[in-house]
Amino acid sequence: KAGVTQTPRYLIKTRGQQVTLSCSPISGHRSVSWYQQTPGQGLQFLFEYFSETQRNKGNFPGRFSGRQFSNSRSEMNVSTLELGDSALYLCASSLKGASSGANVLTFGAGSRLTVL
Amino acid sequence: GEDVEQSLFLSVREGDSSVINCTYTDSSSTYLYWYKQEPGAGLQLLTYIFSNMDMKQDQRLTVLLNKKDKHLSLRIADTQTGDSAIYFCAESIDNQGGKLIFGQGTELSVKP
């Protein structure tokens, strides 16, 4: 069973550019969440999509956006990149449809973004 | 508010037990989780516990939860060098879907 696949694994951008990251969840998983990991702030929740709808959103500026397709694959986009956006962006998928019960997330290896 | 705290470093000798501690503030936490992250990798779920439980054991791992003090611990028995990694505790809040609140992570170093 394939795990969560994130592409690209590494990328370098310059300030002001935009970037799109992709996440393919485990087959059958309908929920995809995105997290930003930095040395200073740790792991911070960006947003969650379920059945193509954003179900929850973290405290990030509007430059961070995402979407989910009908096959549950998800993309996140960051526009007008800033130096502080350099981070490891982690995607996680889960079966969890209901809002209660344990939320068992399976994480991808991440996309490491460097902004110069 | 939502906050999860962990100590940043722990060093143990191979074969000893490791105990990683975590405190959280949100009393509406429903589940608490332990994840492991090795260099260059994503997070791997180790175990989780429902907030109404006191203890959960899974092979070398024992999770203890003191709900009154909002304190969670992960004990790794017979720690091996392969256990060296960063360990994160996290909480989920009911009706918040895929959102987990993570601690800063505890870097476990196992010396031979």
Image (spheres, coloured by chain):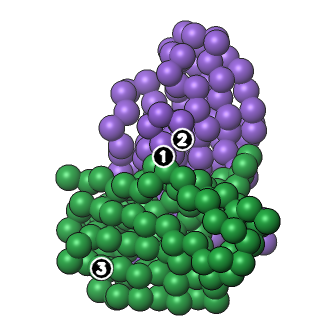
Chain colours: A purple, B green
- The reply to whether dot 2 and dot 3 touch (C-beta < 8 Å) is no
Q: Secondary structure at mark 2?
A: strand
Residue where numbered disc 2 is placed: A37
At horizontal 72% and vertical 49% (from top left) the residue drawn is B39
Reply above or below: A37 against A93. Answer: above
Q: Nearer the viewer, residue A53 or A45?
A: A45
Q: Nearer the viewer, residue B42 or B96?
A: B42
Q: CA distance from mark 2 to mark 1?
A: 4 Å
Q: Classify 10 Å Cα crowding around label 2: few (below 14), some (14-19), many (20 and above).
A: many
Reply above or below: A2 against B40. Answer: below
Q: Classify 10 Å Cα crowding around label 3: few (below 14), some (14-19), many (20 and above).
A: some
Q: Quadrant of residue B47?
A: bottom right
Mark toward the viewer: 3 or 1? 3
Going by the numbered disc 2, the residue's amino acid type is Gln
Whether discs 2 and 3 lie on one chain: the answer is no
Residue where numbered disc 3 is placed: B66
Give x and y (percent) for residue A43: 48, 46
- Does any portion of residue A34 appear in the rendered image? yes
Going by the numbered disc 3, the residue's amino acid type is Asn
Give x and y (percent) for residue A93: 57, 61
Going by the numbered disc 1, the residue's amino acid type is Leu
Q: Is residue B88 left or right of residue B60?
A: left
Residue where numbered disc 1 is placed: A43
Q: Quadrant of the N terminus of chain A?
A: bottom right
At horizontal 55% and vertical 31% (from top left) the residue drawn is A77
Q: Secondary structure at mark 3?
A: strand
- The reply to whether dot 2 and dot 1 touch (C-beta < 8 Å) is yes
Q: Classify 10 Å Cα crowding around label 1: few (below 14), some (14-19), many (20 and above).
A: many
Give x and y (percent) for residue B14: 73, 71
